[in-house]
Each structure stands twice: as structure tokens, then as C-alpha cells.
Image (cartoon, rainbow, N blue to C red):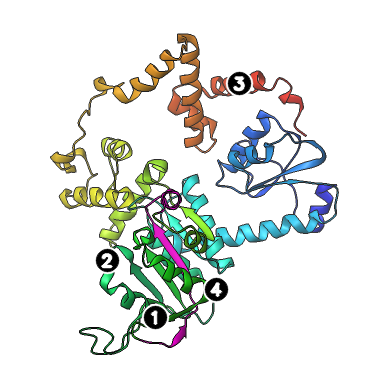
């Protein structure tokens, strides 16, 4: 029935490939099982590919099942009640997802916000959808160097207003309290000493465009209620004037701070937070998107010398970049790569000799592993009474799960990294599913 309805909407089924990469599609099921979760994870490649999970009319959906499938990589979960509206509901979602992913695939995005890791794709999809299909205010959060200003500029570029004006950027960390009113609202001639001429502030300049407040968490408490009024009513007065002026702009804010914590401690106004955070998008730090480090390094070198192919990174340099810590995130990675690039000479690959001595790893030898960072969780497990057998099983399961996730569900590549055969890994996964859900093999429909 589902197939026939979707066929009338020009959505047609086809056989899955052996690795499960079938592209955007619908996965129908009748029972929530571990096998279903693995199917979603494999078919969606941990959320990179769009998969809509559709529960049948008599499907067994325990509490929390929808969230479980979303975390496994499903883009949406629907429970079908037999309504013929399904023929319109699913194509509408596909159309939106295709539009978002088409924007992600443009040079505008690919050449400025590089990365294909699942967590990065998820963040970009959210930004693109909110920026292009809504006029909502957006709060971008993330550590220093994660690309918040780039995302703010992308939001303005993707804003669909035909008559939109300029993007105005105001860094709240540079605002001098004594001159803050002039920076935001502007001033009249003679409003204060040295005000020899009238001046427009950020609100006037952003009228019809976008106002990007960078590091909004640093906004002085005295200015927060005044900003709230402008955001709510779109009216303001210049310093030294009694005339109310109007300004209509899209507001995009960014911060590295935990504003909810600041709200709880009274450092940031709760009502202002909810005004600026109609949508909140968190940009992941580089340590959560390790798969993007090498593509980013290549992109950085291409930017440094656009007319030449970047040098190949030899295995030792690749390992160094993948295991190095980046307190400054992408900005830190950029400086690291450029320092190596400036030292590199000749047509050959970039080697460890190109790494400045002061940046060599402290413990580069394999003999220094496992280190204290590995020992700490083992100590905690032993303190809790975990035996050697259970400890070995937990480490094995964690290593397998992490590797499969890193390889986006590809069991063949995961097996190679783990040093086991494809068959051994498949048997291990099947035994795990069977242990957690004995009837899983017969439950998928």
C-alpha cells in the first residue's frame, strides 16, 4: 500500500545495493529492533544520507523509539495511520531535503565551510534550512575558531529577501561602554564631546539587511535591556535625540559562551536570550569532526597557492594532524598547516621535517602508549568492580562502534582498521544484535 501510494507521487522503489547505500529513501518497518537501528545507521551513513523511517499501521513503537532512530541517523520518523495523505507528506519532506542539500553542494558552501563528517553536515543543514526558508533570528554557538562568523555571513547570503540590504557586523568585545550607545543607536551632532556630526549606528545601517552581533555574550548588562527593546519593537532613538526611528533587520548572534549558564547566573537577561535564540545552532569543535581535518588541511593549502596542486601529506604527517590537539579549532589548524607549508620545498610530499621543532609531539613513540589518559577510565572501571572479562568486552564493543561510526557504517573499511576479517566483524555484530534482541532477525518487515 505504501509503495503504491508513493508510486503515484513519482517515488519508486529499487533494490538495495550490497553495502546498503541506496540514496534518499523510505525505510518501512513494523517492529523496533537493534537490527532496525543498524539498518538506519548503515543506510543513512550515520545521518549523511537522508532516510525517512516509516512505522506501519500496526508497528510496535515503544516510548523513545523515534528518538533512537533519529540518533541512529534517520532524518525523520513517521507513524503511518493508514491516511492517504502519506502520498503528499513524504514528497514534501523529500523536496525540502533536496533543496537544502542542493545548497550545501554549491561552491558557496563547499569552498568556505569545508567538511563531510556527519556532525558537520548536520550543523550546516540546520543553518541552511533556517537561513533560506525562514526569517528567524539565529544564535550561533561554538568554541573559538569553529567558523561562527563564516556561518553568520552565509546566513545573510542565503536570506531569500529580494530587496535585502547590507550585512552589518558588530563585535561586542570591542565596544567601549562610554561609546556603546553611539555604536548601536548612533548620535546627533553635539550629543556629547567631539560629536561634531550626526552618525548612524548599527541599527540604522542594518535596516533592511542583517545585523550580526559577534560575541553577544560579552554585551554589558546595562545595554541588554536597550537591545531587547529594539529587537522586540524595532524602534530606537539616537543619542541626544527625542525622535523614534524604525529599523527592520534580521538578527544573527554568535557567542563562545554558554548563555544558558549565564542566564541562570544572572549575567545575561533571560528575555533577551529567548529573543535572539529563536533558532540555536551549535558548531562542533574540530575534535568532534576529526574526519574533516585532512580535507581542511588540503583546502587551506589550496587557498594559500590557488594556482598549484597542494603537496601530498605523507603518512606520518597525516597521523600527526589527526592526533594533534587544536585548542583554537579550525583557526588553529590553519596556522599549523601554513607553518608546515611555508617550510616545505620541492615537488615531493610534505614530511615530518616540515613540522617546526617546537610543535613536535611530546610523546611521538608508540612505546609511550597507552598513556595516563587511557589509564584513567580503566582505573574508574576497576574501582567500580568491573572484572577483566567485562572490561575486555566493553573495550572491544566501544572500539568496534567507534570505528564503524568513523567509517560511516562501512563494515569492510571498519574491519580493515580493526585488523579483523569482514566475516568476523559481521558475525560479531550479528551476535551483539541477537544478544540484545533475540527475535530481531524475524522482526523486520
**How much space separates mark 2 and mark 1, taking CA atoms?**
18 Å
Who comes first in sequence, dot 2 or dot 3?
A: 2
Report x, y in % for residue 321: 29, 40
**Residue 205 badge:** 1
**Residue 168 badge:** none
The residue segment tinted magenta is: 241-266
* Residue that carries the numbered disc 3 in the rendered image: 432
* Horizontal relation, residue 130 to residue 306: left or right: right
**How much space separates mark 4 and mark 1, taking CA atoms?**
19 Å
* Element carrying mark 3: helix
Residue 129 visible in image: yes
Count residues near mark 2 (Cα–Cα under 10 Å), then give few for <14, some for 14-19, many for 20+.
few
Q: Do the numbered discs 3 and 1 sit on residues whose CB atoms are within 8 Å? A: no
Residue placed most toward the observer, 145 or 51: 145
Residue drawn where x is 50% and y is 61% of the image? 271
**How much space separates mark 4 and mark 3, taking CA atoms?**
48 Å
Amino acid at each position: 500500500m505504501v509503495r503504491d501510494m508513493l508510486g503515484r507521487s513519482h517515488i519508486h522503489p529499487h533494490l538495495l545495493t550490497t553495502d546498503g547505500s541506496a540514496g534518499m529513501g523510505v525505510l518501512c518497518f513494523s517492529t523496533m529492533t537493534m537490527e532496525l537501528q543498524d539498518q538506519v545507521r548503515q543506510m543513512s551513513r550515520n545521518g549523511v544520507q537522508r532516510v525517512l523511517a516509516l512505522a506501519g499501521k500496526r508497528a510496535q513503537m515503544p516510548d523513545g523509539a523515534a528518538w533512537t532512530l533519529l540518533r541512529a541517523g534517520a532524518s525523520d520518523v513517521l507513524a503511518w495511520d493508514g491516511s492517504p495523505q502519506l502520498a503528499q507528506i513524504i514528497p514534501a519532506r523529500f523536496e525540502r531535503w533536496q533543496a537544502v542539500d542542493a545548497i550545501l553542494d554549491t561552491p558557496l558552501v563547499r569552498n568556505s565551510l569545508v567538511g563531510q563528517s556527519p556532525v558537520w553536515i548536520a550543523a550546516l543543514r540546520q543553518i541552511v534550512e533556517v537561513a533560506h526558508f525562514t526569517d528567524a533570528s539565529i544564535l550561533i554557538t561554538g568554541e573559538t575558531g569553529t567558523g561562527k562568523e563564516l556561518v553568520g555571513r552565509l546566513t545573510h547570503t542565503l536570506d531569500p529577501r529580494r530587496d535585502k540590504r547590507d550585512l552589518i557586523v558588530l563585535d561586542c568585545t570591542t565596544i567601549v561602554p562610554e561609546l556603546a550607545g553611539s555604536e548601536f543607536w548612533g548620535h546627533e551632532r553635539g550629543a556629547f564631546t567631539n560629536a561634531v556630526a550626526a552618525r548612524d549606528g548599527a541599527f540604522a545601517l542594518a535596516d533592511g539587511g542583517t545585523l550580526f552581533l559577534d560575541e553577544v555574550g560579552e554585551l554589558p548588562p546595562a545595554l541588554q535591556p536597550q537591545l531587547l527593546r529594539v529587537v522586540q519593537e524595532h524602534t530606537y532613538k539616537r543619542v541626544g535625540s527625542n525622535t523614534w526611528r524604525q529599523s527592520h533587520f534580521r538578527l544573527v548572534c554568535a557567542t563562545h559562551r554558554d548563555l544558558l549558564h549565564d542566564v541562570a547566573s544572572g549575567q545575561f537577561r533571560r528575555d533577551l536570550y529567548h529573543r535572539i535564540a529563536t533558532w540555536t545552532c551549535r558548531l562542533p569543535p574540530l575534535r568532534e569532526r576529526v574526519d574533516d581535518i585532512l580535507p581542511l588541511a588540503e583546502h587551506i593549502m589550496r587557498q594559500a597557492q590557488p594556482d598549484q596542486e597542494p603537496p601530498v601529506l605523507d603518512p606520518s604527517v597525516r597521523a600527526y594532524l589527526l592526533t594533534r590537539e587544536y585548542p583554537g579549532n579550525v583557526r588553529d589548524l590553519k596556522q599549523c598547516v601554513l607553518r608546515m607549508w611555508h617550510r616545505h620545498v620541492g615537488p615531493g610530499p610534505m614530511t615530518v621535517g616540515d613540522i617546526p621543532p617546537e610543535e613536535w609531539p611530546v610523546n611521538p613513540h608508540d612505546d609511550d602508549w597507552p598513556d595516563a589518559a587511557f589509564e584513567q577510565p580503566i582505573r574508574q572501571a576497576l574501582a567500580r568492580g568491573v572484572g577483566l572479562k567485562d572490561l575486555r568486552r566493553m573495550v572491544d564493543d566501544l572500539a568496534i562502534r567507534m570505528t564503524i561510526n568513523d567509517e560511516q557504517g562501512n563494515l569492510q573499511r571498519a574491519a580493515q582498521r580493526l585488523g579483523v576479517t569482514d566475516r568476523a566483524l559481521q558475525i560479531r555484530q550479528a551476535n551483539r544484535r541477537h544478544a540484545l534482541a533475540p527475535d530481531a532477525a524475524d522482526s523486520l518487515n
